[in-house]
Every structure is written in C-alpha cells, then in structure tokens.
Image: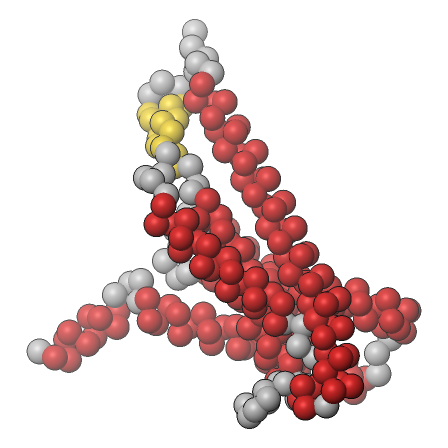
Amino acid sequence: MACFLVPVTEAIVTTIATKIIEKREKEPESVSLSTGGESAETAVKIPFSRKLKWLNGLLWGGSALLAFEHVWHGEVVPWFPFLTAAADPADAAEMLHEMATAGVAMAAFVTVVWLVLLGVSRLIEKRADKETSSPAPSEG
Amino acid sequence: MTLLITVFAAIVCTVIWYRKAPESEMKIGILCWMFWGASLMWLVDAVFEYAELGAEYFTPAPADMLNAAFLGLSAVALGLAIWLVIVLIKDPRGVIRKQLSGAKR
C-alpha cells in the first residue's frame, strides 16, 4: 500500500547524514602496500561517508522500483492524496499497519545487509593493515 | 516472479561491475545498488506474503504470474532508464560535452 515510504524516509535521513559527514571528514587515510619490496601500491581507506553512500544507493534504488510497483497496482496516483488508501479511514489504518510491519522490516533488512557489508569491508581493511605492518618475506 | 527477475538483473549487473572493477566509467555500480535494494525489499514482501498464504505462494495463477513477470521486466527497464539518464547527465566519457562544444563551433 505504502510500505516503500519507510525506506524512503530512512534514505532521506541517511542522505542528509552523508552530506554532513562528508563535510566533516578529513582526507582519506592512505596505506602504502609493498609487494616483495619491489613495487609499492597505495591503498586508500574507504571513508565512512562513502560507505554510507552504499546504504543510500540500496535505499533510494529499492524505493524507486518499489514505488513503481505501487503505481502499477494503482496504490499510488498522481493526484491528491496520492495514496488511494489515504482516502478511506479503514484503508488508511490498514496502510499504516502495513507500513509499520512490512515497511519497517524492509528498511531494517536493508540496513542489516549494509551492516554485514561494513563488517566485510572492515575485515578486508584489517587484513590489508596486517600485510603492511608485517615485514615482507625476504627472498633467498 | 518480480523478485526473481530483479535478482537476476542484480546478479548480471554485479558480474559486469566485477569484470570492469576498479574502473567504473559506465557507473554500473548504480544499477547494482538499485537492483539489489529492490531485491531485498521484494524479498521481505515475499516473506510476508508467504506467511499469509503458506505453500500457495509458490503456485500462483498463470494470469498473476504473467502480470508479475511483466511488472518485473518493466521495473528492470525503469532501472535501466534511470541509470541511462544518470550516465548521460554525468557524461563520464565527455561525449556529450564534446558534441555540444563541436556544435557551438
């Protein structure tokens, strides 16, 4: 009915948060990686604002396609009150219930998946850090 | 069916992104986030529907399945159209800028 409005609300909040964090963030921390002492590669730690953009992408992208589904089913219309369920009090109560259950579950699930992504990227960064701190094995 | 089509679109886009990474000239990442986001949300929707209908969820009427497939394909087309607009506006290869500056001369 209007479950996509919950992820949209979260997307608005996270987009504003991204803009604020981006302004406050310093230059990204860079780590020099040497492979066998011959060539050196510079890896840049992913700033948090960029990681937050992953969540923005998931939320905005998913909500856009979900909103399209609601238009397809006639639940969202281009005239006031835009949500067909909002015109009738009984339907409005059902819509709010759906937002509180399916909508919140969608937003929470997307956020959990993003948190898992954060965990994986943290592990990869830690592994890269370890590689730089331990001396490269000497040959022969 | 809508979920299935979107998941396939997300997988194909992720494979294309991975083949080209770290280069992201065509901004395939936008498509990945969009299709994965929609897939996750539709997955939650599917779980709620399954909780309501039970096993019946897996045996939809042919007309419903056709409508869902049509919706899935339309959603993928919309996603591709959004991505195309973003790519043309950002113009990472500078093709449009070159065309416009050439036309001015």
- Horizontal side of B96 relative to B36 (left or right) equals left
- Horizontal side of B25 relative to B72 (left or right) equals left
Identified at 54% across, 77% down, the residue is B77
The furthest residue to the right: B55
Q: Quadrant of residue A98?
A: bottom right
Q: Position of residue A86 (x, y in %)?
A: 67, 86
- Dividing the image into 4 quarters, which one contains the N terminus of chain A? bottom right
Q: Quadrant of residue B61?
A: bottom right
The furthest residue to the front: A89
The furthest residue to the left: B105
- Dividing the image into 4 quarters, which one contains the C terminus of chain A? top left
Count of labels in the image:
0
Identified at 87% across, 71% down, the residue is B52
Give the answer, above or below, for where A128 lies relative to A82.
Answer: above
Tell me which colouring the rendered structure shows: secondary structure
Q: Nearer the viewer, residue B37 or B19?
A: B37
**Residue A19 in view (yes/no):** yes
Q: Position of residue B55 (x, y in %)?
A: 91, 69
Q: Nearer the viewer, residue A20 or A56?
A: A20
**Residue B13 in view (yes/no):** no
Identified at 33% across, 71% down, the residue is B89
Give the answer, above or below, for where A52 lies relative to B28.
Answer: above
Give the answer, above or below, for where A25 lies relative to A4.
Answer: above
Q: Position of residue A89 (x, y in %)?
A: 74, 87
Q: Position of residue B46 (x, y in %)?
A: 77, 68
Identified at 54% across, 40% down, the residue is A121
Q: Nearer the viewer, residue B24 or A85?
A: A85
- Horizontal side of B62 relative to A108 (left or right) equals right
